[in-house]
Image (spheres, rainbow, N blue to C red):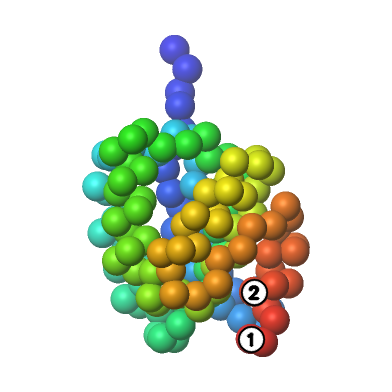
């Protein structure tokens, strides 16, 4: 029997003097993942005192979403999209760059795709 890990890790991370909401998505996300994760993400965003959030999103281990989970992800983006000033997404899969472009339509801030975490952090730190 193999163990399949999937889900979203949520954190608030400090890089030098700047704080970021960090998200790491892994495996193939399910509706049940979002039922458990959405309240935690809501709580994490309430605790961020800055009115405009910069987020660092790691998709390097994401395999995708079940259809219902993709809808859950869309609803989450619509609910919190206005709170983000910058979202830097990094990964190693071409389809995720296209998904980033589509997702950027639903957030008020800038969303941009990067191949490396270092490039994503550099962009997030611009005008910080």
Whether 118 is drawn above or below 35: the answer is: below
In percent of width and height, residue 72 lies at 30, 48
Residue at left 46%, top 52%? 9
Q: Residue furthest top?
A: 1
**83 and 22: which one is in front?**
83
- Looking at the picture, how far across and down is residue 83, in whole percent? 40, 77
The reply to whether residue 20 is visible in this rendering is: no
Determine which of the numbered discs, if any, sits on residue 124 in the image. 2
Disc 1: CA contacts within 10 A as few (<14), some (14-19) or many (>=20): few
Task: Tell me, yes or no, whether the two marked residues, 2 and 1, touch with CB atoms within 8 Å.
Answer: yes
Residue 87 appears in the picture as rendered: yes
The quarter of the image holding the N terminus is: top left
* Residue 116: percent from left, percent from top: 73, 55
Q: Which mark is residue 115?
A: none
Nearer to me, 13 or 56: 56
Q: CA distance from mark 2 to mark 1?
A: 7 Å
| 26 vs 43: above or below | above
Which labelled disc corresponds to residue 128? Answer: 1
Who's the residue at 56% across and 66% down the image? 111
Residue visible at 61% across and 81% down in the picture: 18
| Label 2 neighbour load within 10 Å: few <14, some 14-19, many 20+ | many
Name the element at disc 2.
helix
Between 111 and 38, the one nearer to me in the picture: 111
Closer to the camera, 67 or 6?
Answer: 67
Q: Quadrant of the C terminus?
A: bottom right
When asked about the image quadrant of residue 113, the answer is bottom right
């Amino acid at each position: 029997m193999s163990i399949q890990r999937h889900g979203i890790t949520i954190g608030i991370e400090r890089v030098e003097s700047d704080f970021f909401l960090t998200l790491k998505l892994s495996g193939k996300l399910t509706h049940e993942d979002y039922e458990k994760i959405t309240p935690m993400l809501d709580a994490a965003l309430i605790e961020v005192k800055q009115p405009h959030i910069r987020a660092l999103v790691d998709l390097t281990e994401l395999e995708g979403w079940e259809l219902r989970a993709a809808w859950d992800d869309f609803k989450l983006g619509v609910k919190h999209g206005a709170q983000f000033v910058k979202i830097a997404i990094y990964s190693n899969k071409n389809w995720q760059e296209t998904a980033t472009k589509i997702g950027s339509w639903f957030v008020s801030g800038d969303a941009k795709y990067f191949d490396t975490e270092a490039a994503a952090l550099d962009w997030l730190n611009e005008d910080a």
